Amino acid sequence: MDKIEFSISSESKLVEDKISLDRFLKQQIKNDYDFEPIIIIFSELYMNICHHANSQKNSCSIFEPDTEGNMYIQFSDDGDGIVSKIKSYYTNVHFNSDADCIEFALKENVTTRSLINNKGAGLNILKSIVELLKGNLSIYCKFGLYENRGEQIVKSILDAEIKGTLIEVYLNINNLDKKEISDYSNDLEF
């Protein structure tokens, strides 16, 4: 199975990496699909790592769809991790588990940075797109595992601690919108 891999190092590299991803998707996915949601997922998670991970070992792998159209996307870093960042920033919020903390991080307007361009929408956008595409989302951090499997949310306590954050997205490209091809030939007047 073919895949594309990225080493995430800086915001300035995002544009170059998005162009590479766009080429890969055009090769792997039929041209009649709109794969913009995949580009958005990629960009949001890429920027989250750049803004929050405090890590030098950051990566992304995107695998070509299998024969049924199932696609796997993985982001990982060995940095601070979502749980540590949320717990240190939201000291007044009690979490029963690390999975509850991950779930909290997925809410709209939850952020650990107060920048104008950082409104706490990234993880919420990720969750919304995965739900819209009827995919699955798994986030591993510390001793927590948060899984969004369509209509079902599963939160688990892990036996071993995960350093940093690991995010896995499973989706089916057949759930992507079809590109609309417009024919303007009848609208032209000379």
Image (spheres, rainbow, N blue to C red):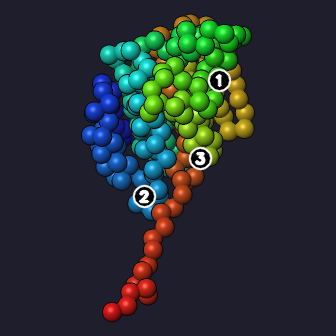
Q: Between residues 114 and 11, which one lies in front from this camera angle?
A: 114
Q: Secondary structure at mark 3?
A: loop
Disc 3 marks which amino acid? Answer: Leu
Q: Between residues 32 and 40, which one lies in front from this camera angle?
A: 40
* Label at residue 92: none
Quadrant where the C terminus is found in the figure: bottom left
User: Residue at coordinates 46% horizontally, 42% vertically from top-left?
Assistant: 40
Q: What crowding class fits label 2: few (fewer than 14 Cα within 10 Å), some (14-19), or many (20 or more)?
A: few
Residue labelled with disc 2: 30
* Label at residue 103: 1
The location of residue 124, given as percent across then percent down, is 58, 34
Disc 1 marks which amino acid? Answer: Glu
Kindly indicate the quadrant of the structure image that contains residue 111: top right
How far apart are labels 1 and 3 at the CA level? 19 Å
Q: Nearer the viewer, mark 1 or mark 3?
A: 1
Q: What crowding class fits label 3: few (fewer than 14 Cα within 10 Å), some (14-19), or many (20 or more)?
A: some
The location of residue 15, given as percent across then percent down, is 30, 40
Q: Between residues 145 and 19, which one lies in front from this camera angle?
A: 19
Q: How many marks?
A: 3
Q: Are marks 1 and 3 in contact (CB under 8 Å)?
A: no
Q: Earlier in the sequence, mark 1 or mark 3?
A: 1
Q: Is residue 66 visible?
A: no
Residue labelled with disc 3: 133
Quadrant where the N terminus is found in the figure: top left
In the image, is residue 65 above or below residue 143? below
Q: Is residue 112 toward the left or the right of residue 153 in the image? A: left
The location of residue 103, given as percent across then percent down, is 65, 23
